[in-house]
Image: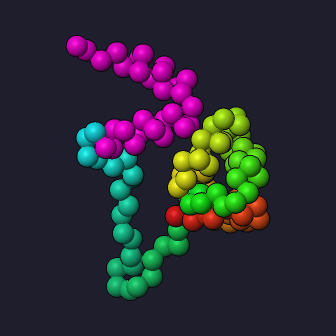
Amino acid sequence: MALDTEKIIADLKEASILELNDLVKAIEEEFGVSAAAPVAVAGAAGGDAAAEKSEFDVELTDAGSAKVKVIKVVKDITGLGLKDAKGLVDGAPSVIKEGVAKEEAEEIQAKLEEVGAKITLK
């Protein structure tokens, strides 16, 4: 059985963020691997100075008691449809935005915490 790479790519393009997230988790569990990018530890040649992190992932760790408000904010932030935004909130902990600048990550964190969500910046 040969893989039809073009069909797989076409299917992935049509998938929602939530479906892709579920696929990654299933692959990680099935094959015992991690999809996380390897992180190199950077340091100065003779000192303790490390480069400041410039990109952050915003993770929703808990939706809190006002889940509907959190879903609306997640929908606005991500541009996802209502169903996909609800899926992210229901699936907490889940990453809402990846690789965003510090200022944007803090802004997203503030918006979500304002409606009662708990957020972690990674």
Q: Is residue 77 visible?
A: no
- Give the image location of residue 114, x and y in percent: 77, 65
Quadrant occupied by the N terminus: top left
Q: Find out whether residue 25 is within the magenta segment.
A: yes
Query: What colouring method underlies this structural image?
Result: rainbow
Q: Say which residue appears at 56% left-offset and 60% top-offset.
A: 61
- Give the image location of residue 12, x and y in percent: 48, 26
Q: Find out whether residue 27 is within the magenta segment.
A: yes
- Give the image location of residue 95, x and y in percent: 55, 52
Q: Which residues are magenta?
A: 1-29
Q: Is residue 40 above or below residue 11?
A: below
By secondary structure, the bulk of the magenta-drawn segment is best described as helix
Which residue is farthest left? 1
Q: Is residue 51 above or below residue 91?
A: below
Q: Say which residue appears at 48% left-offset and 40% top-offset.
A: 21
In front of the other: 33 or 82: 82
Q: Is residue 66 visible?
A: yes
Which residue is farthest bottom? 47
- Give the image location of residue 115, x and y in percent: 76, 61
Q: How many marks?
A: 0
Q: Say which residue appears at 74% left-offset and 49% top-offset.
A: 68
Q: Say which residue appears at 38% left-offset and 86% top-offset.
A: 47
In front of the other: 66 or 78: 66
